[in-house]
Image (cartoon, rainbow, N blue to C red):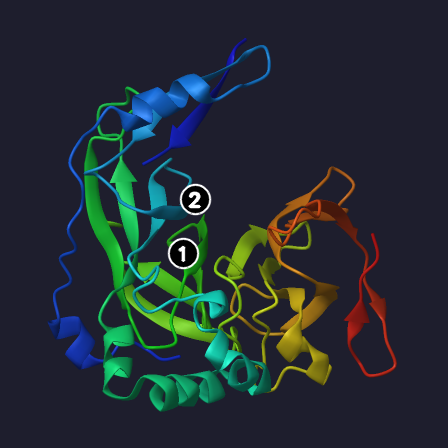
Amino acid sequence: MRHLIKVLFGFFMATAAMAQHEFNPKVKGPSQEPVATLKRIKVPEGFSTRLFAAEPLLANPVAFTLDKRLRCYVAETFRLHAGVTDIRKHMDWLDDDLACRTVADRDRMYQKKLGAKAASYGESHDRVRLLLDTDGDGVADKASVFADGFSNRVDGIGAGLLARGDKVWFTCIPDLWQMESNKDGTKDASRKSLSTGYGVHVGFLGHDLHGLVMGPDRRLYFSIGDRGLNVPGLKAPAALADTGAVLRCEPDGSNLEVFAFGLRNPQELAFDDLGELFTGDNNSDGGDQARWTHLETRATPDGGSATSS
C-alpha cells in the first residue's frame, strides 16, 4: 500500500483594541512555484507527494497540525522582519541584548533603541489559519482565520501547534497558549496563556518556541531555542536565559518543568516506540553540522536538569 505525504507550501492576552483592529495582509495569488517545488522533493520508494494547499489559501506557513477530523491548523507569520528580527541585523544592540534577563528587558531595549519606531513592532500579526478539505479529495478548498491578534511588540514567531479534541495549543514567544474552539470549530472561542517568559533575547531568527508534541505520559512537550527563557514560578537555573531547552507540562499548563537544557536550537521533538525523546538541534550557518540528539534528563544540584546525547 502506497503512503502519501501531503506537503504544505506555500505576553499578553489580546486586548479589546487588538480585537477591533482588522488585520488584512497582502497574500500572493496562485502561482506555479508550489508545483515546481514538488518536482524537486525526493521521497523513499512507496511514498508520493501531493500539493495540499498554497497561496492564496494560506501564506508564510511555519507549523501545522491535524485534529481528529483531519482539519488542518496552520501557524502563519507576517512578523518576519516586521516585529521579529535577527541580532545579526543589529550588531550595535548586541551588548544590550545579551544583558536582557527577561522578556520585559527586551521590550525596554526595543523602546530604547528604536524610539518612536518601536510602535512598528506591534503592527504585523502572527495567526492560526484553518484549512478544510470539504469534498474529501485530499486538497484544501476552504480557509479561514482560526485565531489572530498575536501582535505585541515582543511576540513571535509562532512556530508550534498541536490540536487535541476542541483544544489547540500554540507556541508563540513569549507564551504557550491554549485555545478552545467555538461550537462549530471554526474560531477560537477563548484563549489563555499557560505560561509566559519565553524569548528573553532577540537572538537568531528561527530560534523560537516550537516542537509541540504530546508525550507518552500525556504531557505537553515543547522546545525553545537559545533566545532563552525566564518563566515566573519555574524552578530552573538562571542559565536558561541564555540557552535552548525542552520543557514539559500538563495539558492545562500545570507542573511546568525543564526536561533538558544546554541545547542550541532544538526544533521538532519525536518519541520512539520506547518513549525515548529525540530532537534535531540545528547548526549555526557557519559550516558546523546539525545534530540529531537523544535527550536524557537527570537531576542537577540546582534543581534543574541536564541533557546528554
Q: Quadrant of residue 221?
A: bottom right
Q: Position of residue 10 (x, y in %)?
A: 31, 36
The numbered dot on residue 65 is: 2
**Vertical order, 150 against 80 (above or below):** below
Q: Is residue 233 left or right of residue 88?
A: right
Which residue is the site of mark 1? 168
Circle 2: residue type: Thr
The residue sitting at 52% across, 76% down in the picture is 201
Identify the secondary structure beneath mark 1: strand
Q: Quadrant of residue 300?
A: bottom right
The numbered dot on residue 96 is: none
**Vertical order, 7 against 113 (above or below):** above
Q: Nearer the viewer, residue 52 or 169?
A: 52
Question: Could you tell me if the residues under marks 1 and 2 are in contact, i.e. CB atoms within 8 Å?
Answer: yes
**Circle 1: is it few (<14), some (14-19), or many (20+) Cα within 10 Å?**
many
On the question of residue 266 being in view, the answer is yes
C-alpha distance separating marks 1 and 2: 9 Å
Identify the secondary structure beneath mark 2: strand
Q: Position of residue 6 (x, y in %)?
A: 42, 26
The residue sitting at 27% across, 33% down in the picture is 54
